[in-house]
Image: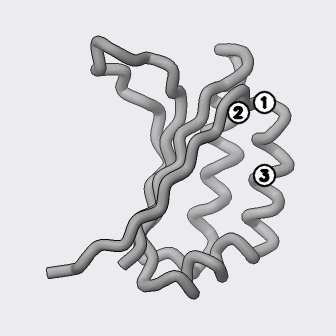
Amino acid sequence: MIRHIVLFRARRSEDVEAIRTGLERLKEIPAAARLEVALNGRQDAWSNEIDVVVYGEFADAGALESYKAHPLYDEAVRLVRPLRDLRFAADFETQVD
């Protein structure tokens, strides 16, 4: 399984909800076994830079590539890119019990 985590920071605080809403479209892409979009709970005393988190689980690298190739992915990018200041992504493979 591939776990896909993407962190976003808004350019302006008033754009956080628009970023979350734009990213919600990603849930309609069937390639993900699991996909969550959430506001950061800001419970870390050391870091409050992140506003929105995307967490996904994919069966394999092919499923993740299919997700990224989907037209809704491009639509979400077009909606969110102008509103975000930072985007960090990480993918890692893990074993499923």
What is the crowding at mark 2: few (fewer than 14 residues within 10 Å), some, or many (at least 20)? some
Ranked by sequence position, the earlier of labels 1 and 3 is 3
**Numbered-mark total:** 3
Q: Which residue is mark 2?
A: 18
- Residue 34 located left or right of residue 29: left
Ranked by sequence position, the earlier of labels 2 and 1 is 2
Between 43 and 46, the one lying in front of the other is 46
Looking at the rendered structure, the secondary structure element under dot 1 is: helix
Residue type at mark 3? Answer: Val
Looking at the rendered structure, the secondary structure element under dot 3 is: helix
Looking at the rendered structure, the secondary structure element under dot 2 is: helix
Q: Quadrant of residue 62?
A: bottom right
Residue type at mark 1? Answer: Leu
Q: At which x and y percent is residue 38?
A: 46, 41
* Residue at (74, 75) in percent of width and height: 70
Q: Which residue is mark 3?
A: 77
